[in-house]
Image (cartoon, rainbow, N blue to C red):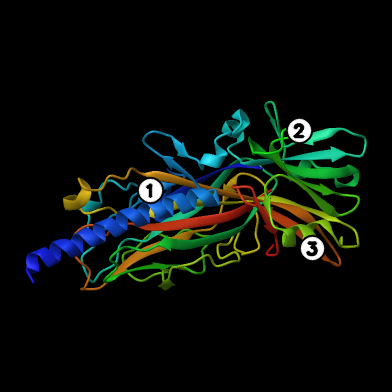
Amino acid sequence: MAADFTWTQTYGHATSAVNSDLGISGNLFNFKRIDDATAANYSSYPVPAGEKSYEVWLRGKFTGSFNKVDNIQFWRSTDFSPNTGLSIKWAPSTPSAYATPVTGTNVCVSGVPSADPGTANVSIGGVLSGALSASGYTDYMVVQLDTTSAAAAGDTSLATFTLNYDES
Amino acid sequence: MDTINKKIDELLNIRQNAMVNYARSTNDLIDLGVKIKDKKTDSVTLPSSFAKYLDKYNISNLEFEWEVKYKDGSILKQFEGEEQRNFSHIDQERIESISFISNFDWPSEADKDPRIIARLNWNTGLFEFQNGFISQDVKTIACMNPIPGNKKLILFARKRFSASNGEINEQYKEFFPFEDEVFYYNRFILGYETENGMKAIIIGPNGKINIFKNK
């Protein structure tokens, strides 16, 4: 029971995708109009009101010594305040295969869960009942900021995403 | 009414409520056992009642660690020196008892071990508790009426991590005194299931013990 967890973001074209470890917690990424894995340059690549950000392809990465990691649950703990004109979409299918991020509508087709789902909602190896028994990744939690013309100019304030898992 | 004074009062109210809510919610999070680490200073805010964390906590970063006692009297610990064990290392055929033991001392009677211990007697299928917060209702369920049948061990930790997204507007940043924080929250589940049902407890990082129902 000593798995090491980190959030990981995959970015770039599907044929040359890059995995970037983001860290455990804190302000790890931003929604932008550039496909990269840094929270830093968001002001240079703002999302125009009425449009979408690039999709952000996240996974949970587990390393270290453990018997099993499973029951992955993902939700949005806090929303932007104010959230006028801002909604965060996600891919409820939690795809196991990566695809090049886009700014249009692709896999992010519904609102990200806003509360602990209570049961697994992120798959491992393509199934919700899947488990890791050695170092590896969950499937993808793809999120995307969707805006309307009512979105205010400037920074969005903070939203928080949570990942919950069982480890033996 | 002077409209400017009204506006100032409104803003003072919003600011004061925000500060009070911040203090209250931080206190409540810490009472629940959530560890808040300041990423800049690396310091973790702990509840005052948890002031006696043992050095070991700093190694495993877990509030509770398990320990298995076998029928021959030998002990298998989750963490022992450099060695780390997990569920797969436990020989369920040989179990006498399994305990979750806190990595902090808890106020207790002078002649008692101050650590919180939740122990499952594998032979009887019943729990025993030392210290910790446990209601009489939970104790009654955990300590009576074992589930008959062939036991399969339930032993795992439930963990959560949060990642933030977004920024505070540049114009407000100089008035935003908060540093980037890391939140830890672990819970510990111990019990067994048979063909006739499940009996398990969930231990919060603050030492509160409840019946675990949602596997």
The residue identified by callout 2 is: B111
Q: Which numbered mark, 3 or 1, is in the foreground of this view?
A: 3
What quarter of the picture does the C terminus of chain B occupy? bottom right
Q: Which numbered mark, 2 or 3, is in the foreground of this view?
A: 2
Q: Amino acid at mark 2?
A: Asp
Question: Vertical placement of A80 versus B180: above or below?
Answer: below
Report, in whole angstroms, how far the alpha carbon at label 3 lies from the one at label 1.
39 Å
Residue at the spot 65% in from the left edge and 59% down from the top edge: A130
Instruction: Specify which label sits upstream in the sequence, 2 or 3.
Output: 2
Residue A13 sits in quarter: bottom left
Question: Vertical placement of A132 versus A99: above or below?
Answer: above
What quarter of the picture does the N terminus of chain B occupy? bottom left
Q: Amino acid at mark 3?
A: Met
Residue B198 is tagged as: 3
User: Are discs 3 and 1 both within one chain?
Assistant: no
Image location of residue A105, percent across then percent down = 35, 71
Tag 3 secondary structure: strand
Task: Bin the neighbour count of mark 2 within 10 Å (Cα to Cα): few under 14, some 14-19, many 20 and up.
Answer: few
Report, in whole angstroms, how far the alpha carbon at label 1 lies from the one at label 2.
48 Å
Residue B17 is tagged as: none
Residue at the spot 80% in from the left edge and 44% down from the top edge: B98
What is the count of numbered marks? 3
Report, in whole angstroms, how far the alpha carbon at label 2 lies from the one at label 3.
34 Å
